[in-house]
DNA sequence: GCTTCATTGATACAGTCGTATCCATCGCAT
DNA sequence: ATGCGATGGATACGACTGTATCAATGAAGC
């Protein structure tokens, strides 16, 4: 609740305001009053009341420019996951992000650029989270645990991954008729089957890899299969428990029983 | 190309037409001419010119009511596959179907009912085509050929299946936020994994089914995997040749080498 | 004080959207 | 020839769309 927008006259001298019909409503009666208020704020900022010199990150205060783009992109994710990408209008996005329409326009220029950028950011976010989960594994040399973690990135295991999966599917459909979105998809996501194939292959010498298996073909079906199973879970056609049983069955088959 | 709508005068006597500003444009100069034309049509219908009693279905002449709904639904499919479901507006659909907006409204009542019905019809259409392809197999007892045919129903192997796949994915995404569409999805598509599992199991006794395989789990990953691979093909991220190699590898693994 | 620049609130603009209304003509029967 | 319900063309309605415009802000240098 800051001071009311324009009902109390000039914020400095209290004089009546001209009340323009167009543009932003005035808050000062003159530019001199505006400059006076500015210098007052500047002085307060110079002595910012005991800041512990970098103890905790300033969670609420973002680097302004990039931070706001990020927050708007997150609003796009939430809307796309909850109500579908088709109801992500500029005004809805602005409301969800808690900013004005003009700010969204200014930050991204056009809706199309906003959508492309939101997809790109979600890709980055997900890759970072996936890497973090892999790094948090207790035994980094256990191929089965590693495979389970990697494959789990495409399953709706928590709110975050459920949302990401929904958003990605919505974007996937759009990308079928939108080259700019298609490029974001095709540019990333490639080395995944290779990673899984490498994990399977690496399990061969010391693990229990049955001979005669083609790691590449196994990885191919495993990755696309897990994606398809995840979509069924989103839909309510399967439970995660069933999916894990199927995945574990195939991991047993490929790597040998646990 | 029937006779032009209203440029040639009365369809019976050829007289000039009053050309009303509101409502449907007239085709007859008077009610008597209208009745004359009706009786003429009725007589032709009574003696329908050597119909061989059910030899071939009257492909072009549809039962009017259901036939038109079908044509409008096909227009929805074409638009959804070509330009995306989000650009399937009532007016676009009407234009694509070659009818007026009012006709689309009249035939389906609301856009939502139209979309649901179009999805239902596409499901029926696809099931019929799939059954026909299975029935056309040279050797109905060959599990490998049967499996390849069944799994092929989810791959963009021709223009029809490519279109159906695109439409289904678009609808799938909508169904995540639209219960009526979700019901159409959940109501069908269930017995598919069971069919594939049955085919795998049946190949056991006389075929070359390796012991230790769980037909149900194999079918589970195979079906969802083929779906996922098909989506990648739609996107251009894979070729159909690569997909067939992966599928055939796994059929070899499950059924034994060809 | 002045000016400049990036930012932004309020609103206008030109569409498209799904749906509803009006009403003439339709097929069909009496 | 008239009546009836189904059909359908033209158009209005109100809501919403993405984008553009105007003017005033915050912040800064001179």
Image (tube, coloured by chain):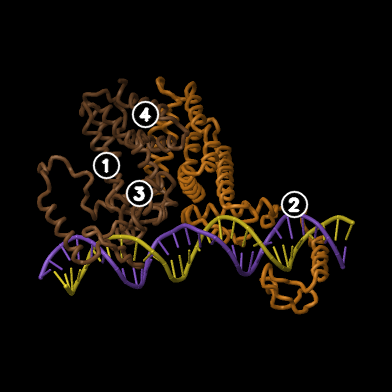
Chain colours: A orange, B brown, C purple, D yellow
Residue drawn at the location 30% of the way across and 36% of the way down: B216
Question: Mark 1 and 4 residues: CB-CB less than 8 Å, in contact?
Answer: no
Q: CA distance from mark 2 to mark 4?
A: 56 Å
Chain under callout 3: B
Quarter assignment of residue B22? bottom left
Question: Closer to us: mark 2 or mark 1?
Answer: 1
Measured from the top left, where is residue B233 in percent x and y? 43, 34
Q: Does residue B229 appear left or right of residue A104 in this picture?
A: left
Q: Which residue is mark 4?
A: B247
Q: CA distance from mark 2 to mark 1?
A: 64 Å
Dot 4 or dot 3, earlier in sequence: 3
Q: Which residue is mark 2?
A: A54
Residue drawn at the location 80% of the way across and 72% of the way down: A30
Chain under callout 4: B
Question: Closer to us: mark 2 or mark 4?
Answer: 4
Q: CA distance from mark 3 to mark 2?
A: 61 Å
Q: Which residue is mark 3?
A: B75
Q: Which residue is mark 1?
A: B127
């Amino acid at each position: 609740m800051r001071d009311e927008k324009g009902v109390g006259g000039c914020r400095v001298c209290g004089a009546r305001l001209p009340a323009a019909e167009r543009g932003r409503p005035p808050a000062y009666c003159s530019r001199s009053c505006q400059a006076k208020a500015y210098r007052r704020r500047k002085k307060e900022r110079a002595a910012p009341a005991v800041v512990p010199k970098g103890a905790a990150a300033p969670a609420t205060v973002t680097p302004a420019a990039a931070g706001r783009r990020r927050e708007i992109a997150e609003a796009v994710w939430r809307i796309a996951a909850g109500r579908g990408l088709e109801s992500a209008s500029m005004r809805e996005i602005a409301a969800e992000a808690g900013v004005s329409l003009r700010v969204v326009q200014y930050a991204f220029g056009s809706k199309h650029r906003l959508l492309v950028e939101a997809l790109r950011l979600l890709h980055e976010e997900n890759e970072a989270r996936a890497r973090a989960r892999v790094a948090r594994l207790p035994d980094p040399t256990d191929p089965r645990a590693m495979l389970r973690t990697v494959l789990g990135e495409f399953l709706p295991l928590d709110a975050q991954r459920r949302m990401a999966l929904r958003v990605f599917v919505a974007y996937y459909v759009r990308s079928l008729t939108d080259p700019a979105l298609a490029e974001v998809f095709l540019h990333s996501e490639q080395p995944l089957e290779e990673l899984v194939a490498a994990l399977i292959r690496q399990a061969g010498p010391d693990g229990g890899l049955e001979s005669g298996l083609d790691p590449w073909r196994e990885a191919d079906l495993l990755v696309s299969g897990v994606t398809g199973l995840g979509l069924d879970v989103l839909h309510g056609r399967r439970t995660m428990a069933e999916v894990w049983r199927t995945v574990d069955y195939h991991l047993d088959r490929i790597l040998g029983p646990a």
